[in-house]
């Protein structure tokens, strides 16, 4: 549904969150990680020397960093548990696992 001109003017200039979805080919329906940023993402890259680090450049010029190591470990445990028939008691939402590195 199209927003009215008044609604568009009201929302103009407000910060909107955007997301980076990281997928695993073993589960093409559900993203493995959902990373949230406080604005439009212009570009993002994994660190070539440490694939646990992901940097993103926001349209505002802000740079965001995420450390994925603990979340990757959690995802591997879930995958291993799912293949061994373990229950879903220890499931954690991917969005809750990955935290942005706070600026100093």
Image (cartoon, rainbow, N blue to C red):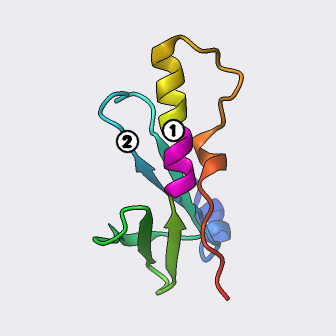
Element on which disc 1 rests: helix
Q: Main secondary structure of the magenta part?
A: helix
Residue 101 falls left or right of residue 84: right
Q: Nearer the viewer, residue 77 or 17?
A: 77
Q: Position of residue 56 (x, y in %)?
A: 42, 72
Q: Is residue 85 above or below residue 75?
A: above
Side of 26 relative to 15 (left or right): left
Name the front one of labels 1 and 2: 1
Q: Residue at x 42, y 67 (%)?
A: 54
> Vertically, is 1 above or below 16?
above
Where is mark 2, residue-wise?
A: 23
Q: Quadrant of residue 94?
A: top right
Instruction: Using residue 50 as the reference point, say whether residue 95 is left or right of it.
Output: right
Instruction: Name which quarter of the figure residue 81 lies in.
Output: top right
Bin the neighbour count of mark 2 within 10 Å (Cα to Cα): few under 14, some 14-19, many 20 and up: some
Q: Residue furthest right?
A: 89
At x 60%, y 67%, the residue is 100
**Residue under the point 51% across and 56% down:** 69
Neighbor class of circle 1 (other Cα within 10 Å; few <14, some 14-19, many 20+) is some
Query: Residue 31 location, x and y as percent?
Result: 45, 38
As helix, strand or loop, the secondary structure at mark 2 comes to loop
Distance from disc 1 to disc 2, alpha carbons, whole Å, reads: 12 Å
Residue 61 within the magenta-colored segment of the rendering: no
**Where's residue 3, x and y in %?**
57, 53
Q: How many marks?
A: 2
Magenta range:
69-74
Question: Which of the labelled discs sits on residue 75, or is there none?
Answer: 1
Q: Is residue 71 magenta?
A: yes
């Amino acid at each position: 549904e199209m927003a009215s001109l008044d609604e568009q003017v009201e929302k103009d200039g407000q910060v909107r969150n955007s997301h980076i979805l990281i997928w695993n080919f073993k589960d093409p329906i559900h993203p493995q990680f959902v990373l949230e940023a406080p604005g439009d993402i212009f570009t993002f890259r994994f660190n070539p020397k440490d694939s646990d680090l992901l940097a993103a450049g926001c349209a505002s010029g802000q740079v965001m960093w995420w450390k994925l190591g603990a979340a990757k470990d959690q995802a591997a445990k879930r995958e291993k548990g799912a293949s061994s028939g373990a229950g879903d008691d220890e499931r954690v939402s991917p969005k809750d696992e990955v935290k942005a590195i706070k600026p100093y």
